[in-house]
Image (cartoon, grey):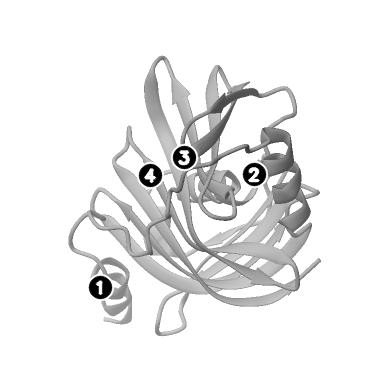
Amino acid sequence: MMRTCITLLLTAFITSGCHTVPFQKTHYMPLKGVDPAQVRAQFIDRLPASFETINSTVFAYRFLKVSCLGPARIDIVNNRFTVIGMNHVGVKLFELNYTNGAIGETYVFPELQKHENFAKGVCEDIARIYLDLVPPETAHIVLKKRKVIFRAHADGGVMEYIFAGPDQYLTEKRFCKDGRKIWSVRYYEYTSDHGKVFPGGVVLRHYGYNYYLVIRLKEILEHE
């Protein structure tokens, strides 16, 4: 009976697709006289080297729809993180560790283990969201009226980093291959804490799998 109740709690949070972004839209304003190198340098300066936050997260993939709340400890410099997710009755759903592309010790709730590669998929998505946020210096630059786009070759395709808005922060990162958009991450509602910036909302979409992940920042615990 307890397992049945937990399963219902896991799957009942959302019953439809993410048709409306639950965050304030980015204000794309004309960019005049913008120096792309300065945009990149400013963003690097405003990024924390590492941080810990509390986030609410929603995963939706086919018939699996999960909401959870928990801490994320992200080390951007050393390319590693630990994320923990609990449902709203306090049951731990997962605890995942990742370092330089390798998944470390993990815990995944038994019901979620039925979904193949759950831990691997979540780790890859968290890495897409929180790591590799700065385009390489060698990236090709495209200046548009309201956006600065940096394009770089990656994993047999092209990674695009799009900077826009009043502060010219990273608003989207997307990966394209063979002329198709494979996945994208959009960043919304940046907030500042002691000179460092954090997106208040994140939406990741994987177009091939019709999958999305939504993260809402709840609290900044610490950062460097």
* Quadrant hosting residue 3: bottom left
Mark 2, Cα crowd under 10 Å, few <14 / some 14-19 / many 20+, is some
Q: Secondary structure at mark 3?
A: loop
Left or right: where does residue 38 sit relative to residue 29?
right
Asked if marks 4 and 3 touch (Cβ < 8 Å), the reply is no
Q: Earlier in the sequence, mark 4 or mark 3?
A: 3
Distance from disc 4 to disc 3, alpha carbons, whole Å, reads 23 Å
Pointer 1 with pointer 4, Cβ within 8 A: no
Residue type at tag 4: Arg
Question: In this figure, which residue is indicated by the disc labeled 3?
Answer: 146
Residue most toward the left?
Answer: 16
Q: CA distance from mark 3 to mark 1?
A: 44 Å
Which comes sooner in the sequence, label 3 or label 2?
2
Pointer 4 residue: 205
Question: As shown in the figure, which amino acid type bears the numbered disc 3?
Answer: Arg
Residue 111: x %, y % from top left: 37, 62
Label 2: which secondary element? loop
Whole-number angstrom distance, CA of label 2 to CA of label 4: 17 Å
Q: Which residue is mark 2?
A: 133
Indicate which disc, 3 or 1, sits on the residue closer to the N terminus: 1
Q: Is residue 179 above or below residue 4?
A: above
Q: Nearer the viewer, residue 38 or 100?
A: 38
Give whichever of discs 2 and 4 has the lower sequence position. Answer: 2
